[in-house]
Amino acid sequence: MKRREIPGLRLLFLSMVLLLLPAGVVARGVTAEEIAPGIYLRPGIQEEFAPPNHGHIANIGFIVGNQAVAVIDTGSTLNEGLWLRRLIREVTDLPIAYVILTHMHPDHSLGAAAFRQDEPEYIGHKQLSGALASRQSVYLNRMNQILGIMAKGTEMVLPTRTVDVGEVLKLDLGGRGLYLRGYPTAHTNNDLSVYDDKTGTLWLSDLLFVERIPVMDGSLRGWLKIIGELGDRGCVQVAADSAPPLKAEASEGCKTVNRIVPGHGPVVTQWKQALGDQRRYLEIIATGIRKIIKQGGTIPEAVASVGLEERDKWLLFDQFHGRNVTAVFAELEWE
Ligand SMILES: [Zn+2]
């Protein structure tokens, strides 16, 4: 199938057209960029869900191979998913063969129905279906309450193919391979990453937050272990856990990472620094909470005192820090 000749320019043109549209037609700041050859990112707005941003708050995008397209995350609503689909069609006519959902959170997963007409494989972590199904009414009600008419028609789509913890699934888009890895509980209990072997791009989604405060909805200890191993190795494991043990340096089973796409915030090439910032925040709250638990303290005491020195370092700190401390307290209380 023929590809358009200059997708970068076409995107630029589309972005300019979008900027010229009256407010309310598209959320402000919504454009997409080609961050590496064939990898398109629509950066999320660094805010919580609200009508002016249309719920366009997560990083979503797509990867174009010689034969097929893979979508990575679909946005918060059917409308956002349809918008992403139109953008893909501005770039390529190739079939949308895969829709990868990196985890359950609504800002990443609820636009999935927009791609039903393409009959893709919907791919997610083995625990994604259960996680989505148990939160269906809460997530959909919340989207309807906050976004109203903009959330019209939004529904959940469950994965048709899954990746287990420690498993790696390789997808061939033609001329580029994507390695999908399922993780033990970290940001959530259903986190999946995508590594593109053509450009060395690791799409970590919400396993990494940049500039915006990390949100804890899984296991602090699990999350620290994953980002600690990635930082220490300096390469991403593309072999299953059942394969022979990895050496520290880049090899067939552990590939060089040139850039990381976080779930929120800008793409990072100095990614060890970004992992380090997130690690610092998580370790500070872990240390502070363990101390309070040891002294027989309570969750409100922890919320009022732990990690406040991080306030100036993160966007949306006041909206999420207290919740993080509460969640981590409950996890560490019984260790
Ligand atoms: Zn998330």
Image: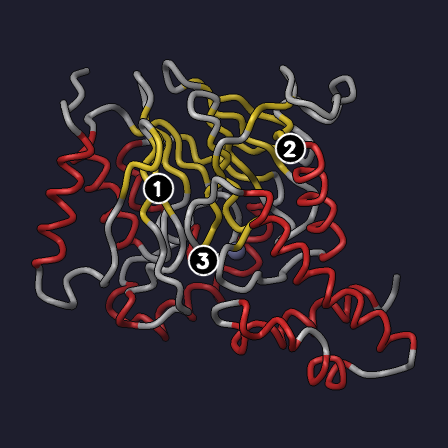
Quarter of the picture containing the C terminus is: bottom right
User: Which residue is located at x 25 percent, y 55 percent?
Assistant: 30
Q: Crowdedness of circle 2 by 10 Å Cα count: few (<14), some, many (20+)?
A: some
Q: Earlier in the sequence, mark 3 or mark 2?
A: 3
User: Which residue is located at x 58 percent, y 39 percent?
Assistant: 125
Residue that label 3 marks: 106
Residue 32 left/right relative to 256: left
> Residue 273, percent across and down?
58, 48
Figure quadrant of residue 254 = top right
Figure quadrant of residue 215 = bottom right
Q: Report the Cα–Cα distance between label 1 and label 2.
A: 25 Å
Secondary structure found at label 1:
strand
Q: Earlier in the sequence, mark 1 or mark 2?
A: 1
User: Which residue is located at x 43 percent, y 25 percent?
Assistant: 199
Q: Report the Cα–Cα distance between label 3 and label 2.
A: 30 Å
Residue 204 left/right relative to 156: right
> Residue 94, percent across and down?
24, 23
Q: Are marks 1 and 2 in contact (CB under 8 Å)?
A: no
Q: Amino acid at mark 2?
A: Gly
Across the whole image, how many numbered discs are drawn on residues? 3
Secondary structure found at label 3:
helix
Q: Amino acid at mark 1?
A: Gly
Discs 3/1, front: 1
> Residue 147, percent across and down?
31, 70
Residue that label 1 marks: 61
Discs 3/2, front: 2
